[in-house]
Amino acid sequence: MPDNPNDILFERARAVIPGGVNSPVRAFRAVGGTPRFVQRAQGAYFWDAAGQRYIDYIGSWGPMILGHGHPAVVEAVQRAVIDGFSFGAPTEREIELAEAILALLPSMEMIRLVSSGTEAAMSALRLARGATGRKYIIKFEGCYHGHADALLVKAGSGLATFGNPTSAGVPPEVVQHTLVLEYNNLAQLEEAFTLHGQEIAGLMIEAIAGNMNFVRASAAFAKRCRELCTQHGALLIFDEVMTGFRVGLHGAQGVLDVRPDLTVLGKVIGGGMPLAAFGGPRAIMEQLAPLGPVYQAGTLSGNPVATACGLATLKEIAKPGFYESLAAKTRSLVDGLKSAAAAEGQPFSADSEGGMFGFFLLNELPQNYATVMTTDGASFNRLFHGLLDRGVYIAPALYEAGFVSAAHCDDDIAATIEAARQIFRKS
Ligand code: HOZ
């Protein structure tokens, strides 16, 4: 009989929930051991069922950019809850959130709110096909766009962890129009458009990929994606579920200075509540029901509590200097880890943008999924568990990006670097 509360909860969970978790990567299958069951969180920390505190570099996989329990957000949510949880009818707050997002992402003229990143990506894909009257879609190996059937083709997140290039339950016919190309491979990109240009409805990309750890599309690659889509009448779709309002106030499209046709958002726009969105030019968005023939709907879409949480979060992050300070903090973490690794002779490379970062136990930053996959899993697992034992919580899989919040302080960063140094020294 286990006596650690996390073990006890995991055993109970496994009896009633497949794998004991409601999203696969949380199960620690890649790294081994027992998932930490979170009891509460505040600022940059959460506490597990055993009362152990962790510096949290996941932040709910990105949304908690202000840290946990930011007072202004908590207050906004509390006020919204009193007025009602869900109406299934429109509210003024949905308009406010739509206006706030559109003001910051000029590539979009209209936006539709949904409940999850998966739903947003799936809907954007349908819209691209409906608006162009074409079937083919391009995606890149290592980019993950949620678990819609047509996009579960060699996806690089939880699926990669389990070694399944595609999911059971997805008939081959459903993915036969999804072309999967290598990230940052210009020759393959050119070839795909040469072969199928007239049939491609859209190209979906994480322009800074957060589901094969942290890999940037090169400026030349992103630019060529834009040019080829324009030239062939396909829609360029930026999946900014992770990067939107995370790498900067204007997302990856701002960082790369590339204007997509459609943008998929999630995570930060809900501030930790189930809220996501997709948007683009008016002429395309008006193809959606009830105006156009592309169907899309949702009972909880634009939920009043989620929109209150998202709006309060956006208000904070739009304050002057927010991203400068977040980016500097994230850079100091990445630089400190690099120095610690160099001092201990540990192969290491790392990168960051805004409040998102990634590191690899490799000498050079990878440019694609195949190179990410050359990371030695056992070394990553040693680092993961070493950090966990020292109260630092990073993603339990080497394919995931990390996230710093405004609540992380210099001491948290210094403690994290010191913990990593100790582990590198031992290795
Ligand atoms: N899709 C996330 C990994 N990139 C995992 C989400 C979760 O487990 O909450």
Image (cartoon, rainbow, N blue to C red):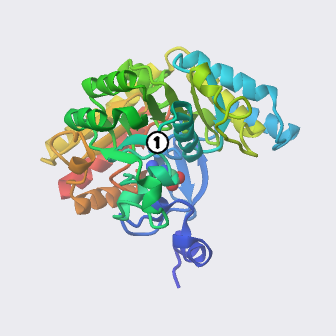
In the rendered image, the residue lying farthest to the left is: 345
Residue depicted at 56% across the width and 18% down the height: 104
Q: Residue 195 at x, y = what percent? A: 28, 38
256 or 71: nearer the viewer = 256
Which kind of residue does numbered mark 1 sit on?
Lys
In which image quadrant can residue 325 be found?
top left
Left or right, 118 with reference to 290 = left
Residue depicted at 36% across the width and 37% down the height: 357
**Where is 291 relative to 23, above or below?**
above
Left or right, 20 with reference to 353 = right
111 or 311: nearer the viewer = 111
In which image quadrant can residue 236 be found?
top left
Q: Secondary structure at mark 1?
A: loop
Residue depicted at 34% across the width and 51% down the height: 399
Q: Visible in this render: residue 54?
A: no
Left or right, 269 with reference to 218 = right
Tag 1 residue = 135
Q: Could you classify mark 1 by the number of other residues whose Cα lies within 10 Å: few (under 14), some (14-19), or many (20 or more)?
A: some
Q: Visible in this render: residue 185?
A: yes
Q: Residue 196 at x, y = what percent? A: 33, 37
Q: Residue 53 at x, y = what percent? A: 51, 53
**What is the tally of numbered marks visible in this picture?**
1
In which image quadrant can residue 256 be found?
top left
The quarter of the rendered structure image containing the C terminus is: bottom left
**Where is 374 relative to 106, above or below?**
below
